[in-house]
Every structure is written in C-alpha cells, then in structure tokens.
Amino acid sequence: MGGLLLFQYDDGGRAAAGYRGRARDCATRAIAIATGCAYQDIYRALAEEAAAEAVLRRNHPRSGLRKHTVKRYLNRIGWRWTATMHIGSGCRVHLRHGELPGGRLIVAVSKHVCAVIDGVLHDTHDCSRGGRRCVYGYWMAS
C-alpha cells in the first residue's frame, strides 16, 4: 500500500487547441497526455476510429468514446493492456502511489480514463478518491 498520487492539472492541450466548454473527452485527454501527442491530432484520430464503427450510441471524442474504440486505437499505435481486476477478484490495485508501475500509463477506472506518468496523476481533476479508486487496468506503450 502506498500514499496518495501527486496530482498535476493537465487538460492534454485541449484549451491550447481552441476547445472550450465541458466535454466527456477523458480518453482523448489521457491519450494526448500519455503519448505526448497534440490534443487535436488525437481528437482527429479517435474521431476517424469512431467513424469506422457502425454504432447507434454516442461514440465521439467530445461526447464520449466506447471502450472498444479506445482499445482498437491504442492497440493500433502499439500500446498494450494489462488488466488489474477480473470478475470475482475484487479490487487489488488502486489509483495510489506504489500500486502502479512507473512510466507513461493510460489508466481505466470506473467511468473514466486518466494518465499517470511516473506516479503523478495528470488530469483536469484529482479522480483518485483519496487513493481508494479501483483501477480496472492500464495501457502502456510496448
């Protein structure tokens, strides 16, 4: 068990790209932050990925992306998934210092995705719930 993650406010370059207002763009922001790519480039790539899928539900970088869309995109750019929770296993890894590996991670938690870089949470808000937020898994560049 570790302590709290350090928190660094980071919008992934969203404001600098000219986007305003509220959006459900956590996956876009997290990918931009973790990869070091421009927000606009990730936004466009994810919009193209989403457009390739025929779905009836919302699936857009601004309004929220389906998990499958994010998974396909990250696999395509060479990032690999590590599950930290399985059916019936309970929560074993939390968004807390010492429970995640070092490096650049895109972390999946309940209804949210964030970036963790060398033990520092990069997001627009501290989503760690005081170190109690359960981590479902994370993406890491291979």
Image: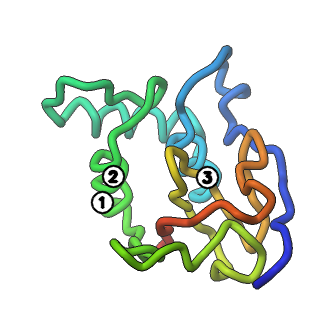
**Element type at marker 3?**
strand
Is 4 or 52 nearer to us in this picture?
4
Looking at the image, residue 92 sits to the left or right of residue 4; the answer is: left
Front tag of 3 and 1: 3
The residue shown at (54%, 56%) is 109
Name the image quarter holding residue 77: bottom left
Q: Quadrant of the N terminus?
A: bottom right
Look at the numbered discs 2 and 1 and tell me whether their residues touch, using CB distance below 8 Å. yes
> How far apart are the two marked residues, 3 and 1, measured between alpha carbons?
19 Å
**Residue assigned mark 3:** 114
Look at the numbered discs 3 and 1 and tell me whether their residues touch, using CB distance below 8 Å. no
**Which x, y percent locates residue 74?**
38, 58
Dot 3 or dot 1: first in sequence order is: 1
Is 122 or 110 nearer to us in this picture?
110
Looking at the image, residue 73 sits to the left or right of residue 51; the answer is: right
The residue shown at (72%, 26%) is 15
Name the image quarter holding residue 118: bottom right
> How far apart are the two marked residues, 2 and 1, measured between alpha carbons?
5 Å
**Residue assigned mark 1:** 76
